[in-house]
Image: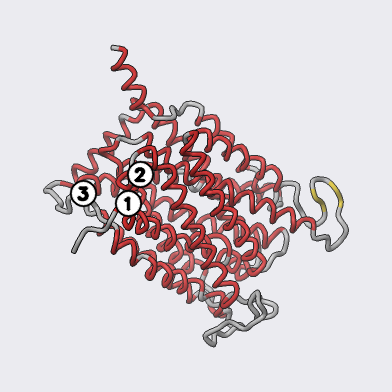
Amino acid sequence: MAAPSLGKRIWGWFFFDWASQPYNTLLITFIFAPYVQEMVGDGSRAQSAWGFGIGAAGIVIALLAPVLGALADTSGNRLTWIKGFSAMYVAGAGMLWFAAPSDFDLVLTLFWFALGMIGMEFATIFTNSMLPDLGPAEKIGRLSGNGWAFGYAGGLVALVVMLTLFAESGETGRTVIGIAPVLGLDPEAREGTRFVGPLTALWYAVFMVPFFLWVRDPKPPALPAGAVRRALAEVATTVRHLPRTPSLFAYLGSSMVYRDALNGMYTFGGIYAAGVLGWSVVDVGVFGILAIISGAVFAVVGGRADEAFGPKPVITACILILTGVAVAILFVSPTRLFGVPLAEGSPAPDVAFYILGVTIGAAGGVIQAASRTMMVRQADPARMTEAFGLYALAGKATSFVAPLAIGFATWATGSQQMGVTPLIALFLIGLALLAFVKPDGDRAAGSAARASA
């Protein structure tokens, strides 16, 4: 059989984003998180539990991500790793069906949720490391942006399917288009909303087929003797030598902080809207549709800007926008909007939150695509998977900071609104560290030094 063309390999790589995005869209943010809040009842307790569950998954990812990346660089065979972690994704998502209202077990629910999330994150490490194989360096930004846009489109379609056919309102038992959940699912048992788990698993299994058919790994599949020991030693050496590559070091620190803040916005967005504005699962889902459309459109626009100006100015602009959003959220409540008292039942807070959500979607899509491109510029081409393992480590090593900070601030102030104030500080710290990052990484500085010598 002839090898797939470059075009097919690129589209196959795009399909991972399409297949995996519903875990973020349907489970982490817009459908399952508000459902958990509804089952727990207390907004603060739900927000804390959600943070602890995601934080526990983040610890596992932080400990293993760089080792797995180094091992893949040593042995190759990234597709086998992706298949294994895909199985975790499907199992974790599918088991969320059993989070029934009549027998809701918060700990068990968070366990399966974390298992699927770990599978998704580890699979992402290996697929991200394939990005440099798909085109020359000057095209990477556009490819990354298009991939994010395609992923957002997949999340959007999955969310529309979920809202129109399955997710029922807890009050009416009807979906957003006014019908009972299809397939004979029982709205009283919330089977329509709980179907979000099996749907996410099935979606991934079906749409990963093009990925496995068309993507090829140029690295040799053989596992040499002592590969695991050598991988561990190489990770330790890489971490120890990070201060010798100051641009990479600064970028890992910067991205660690600003991505943590962005993930905080995504992770707690649904629970926040449900707790502060009283939104239902369906309301949050509609909000998600607008945010995803915005993210998809601007991921493409951001990819073009990345290609034209480089990822650093794009990331800087996005951090400033997201910081402004984090500040604005503090001034949106059912009774006041930016300090102006509102009449009871005014739609203004809902409209304002929709606008803020669209802005988060736009800036979030752009910054994630540009961050992936920036990592390619900062990393050693020979150790790309290990570098993305460290990138995942940077993204998860402090993943507990935003959830715990939000939880503590909420507890200390007694306000879900004031509870999000730590996000402002995290974005500003990330922006400060980004100032020390060279646009083309340490390799550019090394080449200039050799040229002058």
Question: Looking at the picture, how far across and down is residue 87, in whole percent?
Answer: 33, 66
Q: Where is residue 364 in the image (x, y as percent from the top left)?
A: 55, 48
Q: What is the crowding at mark 1: few (fewer than 14 residues within 10 Å), some, or many (at least 20)?
A: many
* Nearest-to-viewer mark from 2 and 3: 3
- Seen in the picture, residue 385 relative to 180 is either above or below; the reply is above
Sequence-first tag of 2 and 3: 3
Which mark's residue is nearer the viewer, 1 or 3? Answer: 3
Q: In the image shown, does 317 or 388 lie closer to the viewer?
A: 317
Amino acid found under the numbered disc labelled 3: Lys
- The residues bearing labels 2 and 1 have C-alpha atoms spaced at a distance of 8 Å
Q: Which of marks 1 and 3 is nearer the N terminus?
A: 1
Comes first in the chain, label 2 or label 1:
1
Rendered image: mark on residue 219: 3
Most foreground residue, 166 or 14: 14
Inspect the image, locate mark 1, and give the three-letter code of the amino acid beneath it.
Phe
Amino acid type assigned to the residue bearing label 2 in the image: Phe
Residue highlighted by disc 2: 388
Answer whether labels 2 and 1 touch (C-beta < 8 Å): yes
Q: What element carries label 3?
A: loop
